Amino acid sequence: MFDFIKTFFRKRSLRKHSSTVPTEILPLGKIRSYVAIIDVEEQSFDTCKTAIMTFFRSHNIKGSVFFQDFRKIGSEDRLITSIQTTITKKDLDWIGRPSRYKLNVLEEQAPDLFISLIKNPDFAIEYMARTSKARFKIGRAQMDGNLFDLVISDPAGKEVSQLDCFTAIKGYLTSKTPLSP
């Protein structure tokens, strides 16, 4: 019964807060800002963060990398990422939405490009992607309603890191003949 109620309120919240900005595949030259979300629990996260920031900086594109960190953090443990850009389980409300503060930090970036490198996105990632006003959205797994304009999925039977996915995205963004939408 609780799952039914949670699902009802999730759908209602998405209907109410989803962005109405049309999305499409944009060439790199039309992207002025980005937001990328990566999973801290994957070993390549720090290298991936550096690769993302270096790539966009080299193209004069401003933005931020956000972190999903759902690990159980004890009282003696510390976050290894910025508290402002890290989404923890404590930042989620009862239906799984990130706190208003975290969403405001994301919204302040006013990204043209939203990238989720989370392999198995949950409701928090879906909520951030759907409410983002980004004009181009990239993910690793497609969600209902073709949320992402471009999906970089793992080949069958092969595990691919966030860094490898970003390398594929980078290759796509810098190609002279990108795929048609």
Image (tube, grey):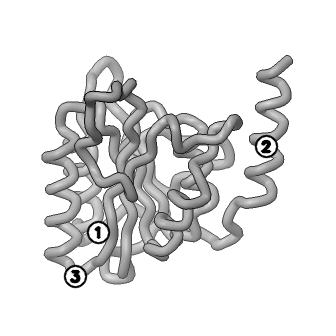
For the image, the number of numbered tags is 3
Q: Amino acid at mark 1?
A: Thr
Residue closer to the observer: 30 or 112: 112
| Label 1 vs label 3, nearer the camera | 3
Q: Say which residue appears at 16% left-offset and 56% top-offset.
A: 51
Which is nearer the N-term, disc 2 or disc 3? 2
Residue at x 81%, y 21% (from the top left corner): 2
Determine crowd level at label 2: few under 14, some 14-19, many 20+ residues with C-alpha closer than 10 A.
few
Asked which secondary structure carries label 2, the reply is helix
The quarter holding residue 26 reads bottom left
Mark 1 or mark 3: which comes first in sequence? 3
Image side of residue 82 versus residue 112, left or right: left
Report the Cα–Cα distance between label 1 and label 2: 38 Å
Q: Nearer the viewer, residue 145 or 180?
A: 145
Which residue in the structure is indicated by mark 3? Answer: 60
- Which residue, given by chain and number where applicable, does mark 2 sit on? 11
Q: Residue at x 50, y 35 (%)?
A: 89
In the rendering, at what x and y percent does residue 27 appear?
Answer: 36, 74
| Three-letter code, disc 2 | Lys
* Quadrant assignment, res 113: bottom left
**Distance between mark 2 and mark 3 Cα atoms:** 37 Å
Q: Is residue 7 above or below residue 151?
A: above
- Amino acid type, residue under disc 3 in the picture: Asn
CA gap, disc 1 and disc 3:
21 Å
Q: Is residue 80 visible?
A: yes
| Residue picked out by circle 1 | 177
Residue 4 location, x and y as percent?
83, 25
Locate residue 41: give its quadrant: top left
Q: Which mark is residue 118?
A: none
Secondary structure, mark 1, is loop
**Left or right of 82 on screen, residue 58:** left
